[in-house]
Image (tube, grey):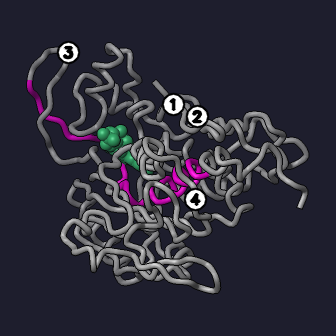
Amino acid sequence: MSFGIGSAFRITVFGESHGQCIGAVVEGCPAGLELGAADIQRELDRRRPGRGTASPRSEGDAVTVESGITDGRTNGGPVMMMIRNEDTDSSWYAKNRNVPRPSHADYTAYVKYGGFNDWRGGGFFSGRITAGMVMGGAVAKKLLLRSGVRAVAHLIQAGGVKAASSPDEGLEARAAGSPVWCADARASKLMVKAIDEARAEGDSIGGAVECRVFGLPAGIGEPVFDSVESVLSHAVFSIPAAKGIEFGGGFALSSRRGSEANDEFALDGGRIVTLTNNSGGLLGGITNGMPLILRVAFKPTPSIAKEQRSVDLSRMAETTIRVGGRHDPCVAVRAVPVVEAVVSASLADMLKNAHLIGKYLDRS
Ligand SMILES: Cc1cc2nc3c(=O)[nH]c(=O)nc-3n(C[C@H](O)[C@H](O)[C@H](O)COP(=O)(O)O)c2cc1C
């Protein structure tokens, strides 16, 4: 059982969708990192509901940092952060608590916790738990920037709409300019349309997020079981609704020839580079100094207004359900900053384990 991830830099998340609060504890952040609530808030605001694809739950999500900071810098102790749940409405869940939503975690949570699970809004299985991931990731992102490492995620697919591939240059700014974090302006508009259509039909759509990490040195990663792919996959599959992951050329490589897929080596000003990056910056589970590239597939939001079949667990009788409450029609959009967060947290852990980040930072 674990609500935490990482060893040298460890994030633990807590809270339930309709409980008092959602938050994160970060252990192992070096002392001396300039950090304030504004750094965390900036990232949380990127995850808030309603971006481009209005979800009716509107919460301020104002973060408070409860410990771990002295004189505006981390002090070496656990950094504890949280937001209060203010706009909760559990009435639909109270009426339907015995009928698990198809493809949500209601049924498995009921079985695992003997019916004592928090049935309100999915409890800690709700997408809202990802706010804690983003809080922890915000600390990691700030820390990584000190080492020149930056993770940038963007939406590359929503339903049937795929974005054209985007150059590294200006990727972050183009994604930030889109209501759905899509760096391809044309696809961005089509994605918003597809999401609006799904919502109007009481339905939902899946999507995919790409994350590129710039500035990683070559040589990070611990083969064989702690390869960079293994560690990042562990983190990424902690995100609810994540269903697939690929690195670099991923599944498409399975239909290529070696002569098409191999990344040839070259020199760039004395630095070893590869001429293509089908390996996604990883060879043998170790970074090779090229940008790390991964893509995550997200399933459609399980809670939909269309009628579906389920079982009333109190009567053990088949029934139907139309999910009420407030839901995003495409969770992949809001997962964009979450992917960035968990990738950053895992990389901060790897860099600290490799002693490239110490117990405290210099004063510069
Ligand atoms: C940012 C984010 C927001 C989410 N919002 C919702 C939502 O509004 N409604 C819903 O049914 N599922 C939502 N989910 C997905 C569910 O939490 C998830 O499908 C469920 O916990 C079952 O887990 P699994 O899909 O990983 O098996 C969201 C996921 C993420 C990452």
User: Which circle, 3 or 1, is nearer the viewer?
Assistant: 1
Q: Which disc is residue 219 wearing? A: 4
Q: Which residue is mark 1?
A: 3
Is residue 331 magenta-colored? yes
The residue sitting at 65% across, 58% down in the picture is 42
Q: Is residue 75 left or right of residue 146?
A: right
Kindly identify the amino acid type of the residue bearing the numbered disc 1. Answer: Phe
The CA distance from mark 3 to mark 2 is 34 Å
Kindly identify the amino acid type of the residue bearing the numbered disc 3. Answer: Ser
The CA distance from mark 3 to mark 1 is 29 Å
Q: Are the two marked residues, 3 and 2, in contact with CB atoms closer than 8 angstroms?
A: no
Q: Could you tell me residue 234's position as x and y percent?
A: 43, 43
Q: Are the two marked residues, 2 and 1, in contact with CB atoms closer than 8 angstroms?
A: yes
- Quick one: 92 or 207, which is closer to the camera? 207
Q: Is residue 290 left or right of residue 40?
A: left
Q: Is residue 287 left or right of residue 91?
A: right
Q: Up-down: is 363 above or below 275?
A: above
Q: Earlier in the sequence, mark 3 or mark 2?
A: 2
Q: Earlier in the sequence, mark 4 or mark 3?
A: 4
Q: Are the two marked residues, 2 and 4, in contact with CB atoms closer than 8 angstroms?
A: no
Give the SS element for disc 4.
Answer: loop
Kindly identify the amino acid type of the residue bearing the numbered disc 4. Answer: Gly
Q: Which residue is mark 2?
A: 12
Specify the segment rendered in magenta. 318-347
